[in-house]
Image: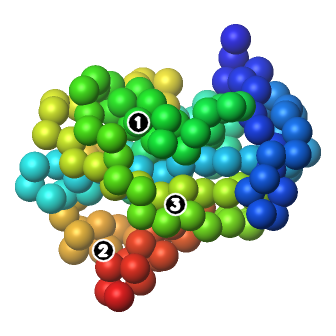
Amino acid sequence: MTPSDEILDIVDENDEVIGQAPRGEATARRLRHRCVFIEVRDAEGRAFVHRRTATKLVFPSHYDMFVGGVVGAGESYEEAALREAEEELGVSGLPQPEPLFRFLYEGEHTWWSAVYQVRCELPVSPQVEEVAWHTFLDDAELERRLDEWPWVPDGLEAYRRLRELRAG
C-alpha cells in the first residue's frame, strides 16, 4: 500500500467525521481531514528541524519544525502523534506527546491540526522516505532561519500559534 492509498477520515468544519477517502483522493480533491504536528525537543531543549523529501505528496522539499502527518481512519490524534513521531524520528519508546491545542488550517489544503510537544533524548535516525535532512536548532537559530528557508505553510501557522500560546 502506498501513502496515497492510506484511508483517512474526512471531517467537517467542526472536526466531525463525515466520510472516508484514500489519502491521494483527499489531497487531490482538497477534502478536509486530520493531521498531527509534534514539536520535538532534545535534552538540551533544541527543536528538531528537517527538510521533507522531494517525493512528499504535500509541500515536497520544504523545511518543517514539526514531525507529524495525517491521522488514519479510526485513529485518534493521540495515537497518530506517537506513531508519527516515532516513525519520522526512527525511534521507539518515546513518551506520549503532550497535547497543546487544535486549530483548523485553511490554506492550499485544509485539515484539522492537533499540535503536541515531546522531549526526545534518544538518538534519532529519521525515516529516509520522509526526511531528507535534519538537525536540532536552538530557538534563536530557528527564528533566524524563518526568513531564509522555504517552510511548510501549515507548520509555520502551527509555530506562530505555539509562540503566541507560550508568550501567553
Decide: is 168 above or below 161.
below
The numbered mark at residue 155 is 3
Q: Quadrant of the C terminus?
A: bottom left
Q: Please name the residue that numbered disc 2 is placed on.
A: 144
Q: Position of residue 48 (x, y in %)?
A: 29, 50
How packed mark 2 is, by other alpha carbons closer than 10 Å (few <14, some 14-19, many 20 or more), is few
Task: Provide the residue designation for mark 1.
Answer: 82
- Asked if residue 111 is positioned above or below residue 142 in the image, the reply reads above
Which dot, 2 or 1, sits closer to the camera? 1
Please state which amino acid type lies under the numbered disc 1. Leu
Taking the image as shown, residue 139 lies to the left or right of residue 15, namely left
Q: CA distance from mark 2 to mark 3?
A: 16 Å
Q: Position of residue 21 (x, y in %)?
A: 85, 32
Q: Which residue is pictured at 56% across the width and 64% down the height?
A: 102
Q: Amino acid at mark 2?
A: Arg
Is residue 7 visible in the rendered structure shown here? Answer: yes
How far is disc 2 from disc 1 in space, using C-alphas?
Answer: 29 Å
Q: Residues within 10 Å of mark 1 (few under 14, many from 20)?
A: many
Residue 69 numbered mark, or none: none
